[in-house]
Each structure stands twice: as structure tokens, then as C-alpha cells.
Image (cartoon, helix red, strand yellow):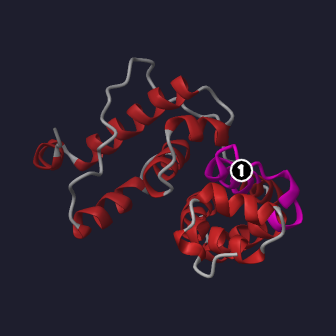
């Protein structure tokens, strides 16, 4: 066993965790807790509940460690668990959120502008995330998963259970909505080539 788990590749950590190594589980928790907290906060709008959802996600992961497959995308797996727990909690609170409301999406081919958050300063970064809060819940969730959790469109598709091509179109639309709110001057100043 390696003393410094932080240097191990994720696949090795997942294998060790599945086989019973709690140090590997702690390292996975360290790597994913803030990403999952962001997703859960985005969905719950309550930092205490978001923290509880992250804890519950890892508690269930610990109980079901035998289901973890090192050959699959662990990030997508753990995000899906957290997403489902948040959906269940929202249903229990009887708060109606239409997760399938993508009425803001217009079907058209997306551009390849994945470097949207590329060259912004910390102040601009904070401003962008404040603006993201103004987006519809479905758009916020996509932006959160793509840019804070750093999941690929394919991984987001796994989390949300929809085709990757649909995710690409919806992400494109969410970024366009964000750009419309930020304004053309901001977009022009911060475009990357």
C-alpha cells in the first residue's frame, strides 16, 4: 500500500477502495467532495442540505463499494449517485422542480466552444458563477457538471441518462444563455481562440 494516496491514478484508487482500502476511499472523497457539494448546492439551494447529500453519497458508496467498477468512469458514477439523492430529497420536500424542462433549448448544432471559462480572472470567475445562478435549473446543472465538476459531455450524459449529443446541444444553449446575460462586451473581452 502506498503512503501517499494523492499521487495514485483514480483507477488505482477505485480498485483499492472496492477491495476494502478506506484510505483510498478517503482520497476519493477528498478529490470529489467539493465538486459534489457544488452540484448538490445547485440543486438544493441549501448549503446544509448539500453537505448532507455529499455525506450520504459517500456513505452509500461505502456500503456499495462492491458495485464500483474501476474500468468505468468513477466521476460519472459518483455524480449520478449524488444527483439521484438530491432528486429524492427534493421529492421528499415536495418542491416541484421540472428537471426535464429544457424549453430554453432550441435545437441547433452546437459550436465547439468548450473553453468558455478558459482565460478569466478570479474576480470574473466569481461574477460568472453569480450569473449562472440566474439560469434555469436545468441549465445551471449542466454548467455546474461541465465546468465545476469538469465532467465531459459523455459523462454528463451518464449522470443525467440522456444521449451525449443532447447534452452537447443543451450545453451550447446554456452557454449562449449565459453569454446573453453577461452581455456582448464581456463575451468579446473574454473570447478565446
Left/right placement of residue 4 relative to residue 126 reads right
Judge whether 51 appears above or below 145 on screen.
below
Which is more toward the observer, 140 or 114? 114
Residue drawn 29% across and 45% down? 116
The reply, left or right, for residue 97 in relation to residue 21 is left
Q: Is residue 64 a member of the stretch shown in magenta?
A: yes
The residue indicated by pointer 1 is 70
Front residue of 34/71: it is 71
Is the C terminus in the top left, top right, bottom left or bottom right quadrant?
Answer: top left
Find residue 121 and report its image quarter: bottom left
- Residue at (83%, 67%) from the top-left corner? 62
Residue at image position (75%, 68%) is: 58
Q: Position of residue 46 (x, y in %)?
A: 61, 71
User: In this view of the protein, can residue 93 be seen by the observer?
Assistant: no
Dot 1 crowding, Cα within 10 Å, few <14, some 14–19, many 20+: some
Relative to 67, residue 169 above or below:
above
- Front-most of 86 and 114? 114
Q: Position of residue 134 (x, y in %)?
A: 42, 53
Q: Quadrant of residue 191?
A: top left
Q: Nearer the viewer, residue 39 or 47?
A: 39
Specify the quadrant that holds the N terminus.
bottom right
Q: Residue at x 69, y 52 (%)?
A: 83
- Residue numbers of the magenta segment: 61-84
**The quadrant where residue 15 appears:** bottom right
Q: Position of residue 94 (x, y in %)?
A: 79, 55
Q: Is residue 52 magenta?
A: no
- Drawn side of residue 120 relative to residue 27, left or right: left
Amino acid at each position: 500500500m502506498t503512503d501517499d494516496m494523492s499521487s495514485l491514478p483514480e483507477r488505482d484508487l477505485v480498485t483499492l477502495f472496492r477491495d476494502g482500502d478506506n484510505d483510498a476511499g478517503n482520497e476519493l472523497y477528498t478529490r470529489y467532495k467539493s465538486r459534489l457539494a457544488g452540484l448538490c448546492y445547485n440543486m438544493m439551494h441549501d448549503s446544509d442540505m448539500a453537505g448532507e447529500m455529499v455525506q450520504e453519497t459517500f456513505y452509500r458508496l461505502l456500503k456499495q463499494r462492491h458495485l464500483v467498477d474501476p474500468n468505468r468512469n468513477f466521476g460519472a458514477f459518483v455524480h449520478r449517485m449524488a444527483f439521484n439523492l438530491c432528486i429524492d430529497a427534493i421529492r421528499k420536500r415536495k418542491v416541484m422542480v421540472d428537471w426535464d424542462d429544457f424549453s430554453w433549448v432550441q435545437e441547433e448544432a452546437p459550436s465547439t466552444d468548450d473553453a468558455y471559462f478558459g482565460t478569466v480572472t478570479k474576480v470574473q470567475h466569481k461574477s460568472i458563477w453569480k450569473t449562472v445562478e440566474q439560469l434555469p435549473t436545468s441549465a445551471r446543472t449542466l454548467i455546474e457538471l461541465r465546468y465545476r465538476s469538469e465532467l465531459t459531455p459523455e459523462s454528463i450524459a451518464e449522470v443525467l441518462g440522456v444521449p451525449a449529443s443532447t447534452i452537447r446541444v443543451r450545453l451550447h444553449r446554456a452557454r449562449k444563455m449565459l453569454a446573453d446575460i453577461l452581455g456582448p462586451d464581456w463575451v468579446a473581452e473574454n473570447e478565446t481562440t
